Structure formats: structure tokens, C-alpha cells
Image (tube, rainbow, N blue to C red):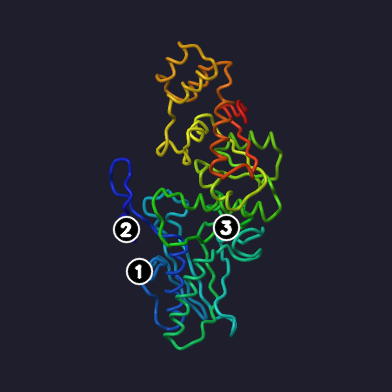
Amino acid sequence: MSETADEHAPDGKPLRRGWTTGACATAATKSALSALLGGGFLDPASITLPGGRQPGFALAHEVSGDGFAEAGIIKDAGDDPDVTHGALIIARVTHGIAGNGVTFHAGPGVGTVTKPGLPLAVGEPAINPVPRSMMSAVVHELATAHGVAPDFAVTISVRDGERLAEKTWNGRLGILGGLSILGTTGIVIPYSCSAWIHSIHRGIDVARAIGLDHIVGSTGDLSEKAAQARLGLPMEAYLDMGDFVGGMLKYLKAHPVAKVTIAGGFAKLVKLAQGALDLHSARSTVELEGLAALLIELGADAALVARVPHANTANEVLTMAGALPLANAVAQRAKAQALKILGGDSIAVTILIVDRSGRIVGEA
């Protein structure tokens, strides 16, 4: 199931919210444990989310046998372009060791943590703390209702999860073998990009934990490759920041490193220079008048300045500027905005502006 969100698409239609992998895994765990304890599979399986909502999840898979039961739920991410939308999340529950309580295990398609810095120890299955808490709660609930100790082993799998994980940050974060089971509220808000921002934060955590003091946030593949060629840092230093420069910098303010480099295309970093923290085209725009004013400061002639408001793109303005150091000037202003977000100069900031051929054309 899903529900209509308060958010709306550009055409005005309401967007549907969806459910996290953690919520699906929790509902599957509850249904499987019910079957293991003799109560039959729950379909739908209703759970209570951290915020109090009580959605019900229809089963897409159920199997039971000697000493085990497993249930599966197809994840509905609503209208969010989530890589795990449509994935089958399976929970297999067996009796555990007496006195051990609830234990969690990675089945096929769920990754294992191999690097420090994440909220899970190295060697643990990539099932995040909130989903673990939610699953533990339903295990305790059913165990109490049946008068048994809550000593059960819960194994979470995601059908085709290893392939889907190739489209995520998991490899860089040291999560190998599949996806992570995520979620803090249980709800996926369309286009909130919470998973992406979560990955930026975890990337910073991993880099800090392995002792790196220089982090690079890039808006895309071209800018990342240009930064790699220039800096030669370990792979863990590079974050696919995308449009979320504000999310990265705010997290760095609270979890600092010695140096951060921001690498991106000209138009993206013009937006940062003009004060935008989200660089997506739907959420911020280039102010051509600001570029015109900057060209005046650089000594551009009146004819050039008069053409700028009629340009189609920021990159067209960069081409029009010719030999004038427009990209460097934008980089300087982007650096000033980054330092403002970081709250001072305790973190050294470098800006690299990369053109569409992958060449660094401006820096500060």
C-alpha cells in the first residue's frame, strides 16, 4: 500500500508516498514469526511506524518448513524514483539460541559492513539501527503474546539485491554483497532524496573513520574524474554529492575534516556562488543578472554585458566571456558561500569548476 503525500509533481498532481525497505522487512518479519509460532501468516501484516502510523502490507511470498518461516513483501516507494521500488524484501525467521534475543543476518541481496564509520560494526549485516529496532519490537510483541522468549534469528534478503546495489553507494561505503536495509521513519517521501543525502553522510563518516582528512564532493561523473586526476586521493575520499552541496557542507560543519574540495560544472557552481544549497534545476536557477554584474567587475565591455541577460544558459555566458576569468570569479564566490555554511575557515575549502569536456576551467 501507499498513501497520497502533501507534495505535488510539477503538473500539480499529488505524489504518492511509499515505504522504506526497513518498514517492509519489519512487516515481513512479523508475518513470518506469526507463522513460525503457529498463528499463520499475517496478510496483510500491520506494523506501527516510529511516527505512529499503522500501515498494512500485503504478502507476495510465504514459505514455511521445519523450524522456519519466511514472508516477502514487494516494496512500494510511491512516486519516488527509488532503486529498490518493486524489490521483493524477504524475512526468514528461525528459532535462535536461548538467551541471545533477536539476532540479525544478511541473506542473499543484503550487504555486509566491511569498513568502519557506519552505525554498524564491521562484519554486521547492513540492516540499519532503526529497522533493527522496529523488527525487534514486533518479535517481542509476538513472543510475549505466545508466552515464549524472544530468541529468534531474523535473516533479511532482497531478491536481485546484489545487482541493485551496483546502482547505490554501497561499494564505496564498504557495504559488500548487496543492499542496505534503511529507514528512520518507515516512510519514503517522494523526491526528498533522503537515501542520497544519507549516503553522503555515511560517506563522510567512513572517510573520517579510516583517517582521511580531505573529502571531495562532486556534482557528477565528469567533475569527479577531473578531481581524481588532480588530487589522487583514495576512492573513499570522493562523494557523489550530486545537487546536495548544502547537505554535505552542513554535515561537515558538525563532523569536520581538514579540507573539502567541491568540484562541479559551471552552472551548478554559479548557483552555489549565488547562495543556493540545492543545485537541482527544479529547485534553483542561475541568475543571469548576477553573472552580468560579475562580468562588469571583471572589466567586460558594455556590449558583452548587454548580451548576458539574453543567453540561454550559464555555459553560454562562460563561452561569451572569452579570456575574462569568469570561472575563477565564480569559484571564489562559491568558496565564500561554502565557508559561510561551514561557519568559518576551520575547514579549508577548494572549488574546482569543470567544463563539459572534463577540463578544469576555474578554481579557488
Residue nearest the viewer, comparing 106 with 319: 319
Amino acid tagged 3: Gly
The answer to which of marks 3 and 2 sits earlier in the sequence is: 2
Horizontally, residue 196 falls left or right of residue 312, namely right
Name the residue type under label 1: Gln
- Gap in angstroms between the C-alphas marked 1 and 3: 28 Å
Circle 1 packing at 10 Å, graded few (<14), some (14-19), many (20+), is few
Between residue 113 and residue 231, name the one nearer to us: 231
Q: Are marks 1 and 2 in contact (CB under 8 Å)?
A: no
* Amino acid beneath label 2: Glu
Reply above or below: 342 against 66.
Answer: above
Of label 1 and label 3, which has the lower sequence position?
1
* Residue at the limit of the structure toward the bottom, as seen here: 147
Q: Is residue 118 above or below residue 275?
A: below
Separation of marks 1 and 2 at Cα, in angstroms: 12 Å
Q: Gap between marks 3 and 2, in whole Å?
A: 28 Å
**Numbered circle sitting on residue 178:** 3
Q: Circle 2 is placed at which residue position? A: 3
Q: Secondary structure at mark 3?
A: strand
* Relative to 22, residue 11 above or below: above
Name the residue nearer the viewer: 332 or 170: 332
Q: Which residue is mark 1?
A: 54
Pick the quarter of the image with the N terminus: bottom left
Task: Judge the density around disc 2: few (<14), some (14-19), many (≥20) Cα neighbours within 10 Å.
Answer: few
Q: Position of residue 223 (x, y in %)?
A: 59, 35
Residue drawn at point x = 69 percent, y = 47 percent:
213
Secondary element at tag 1: loop
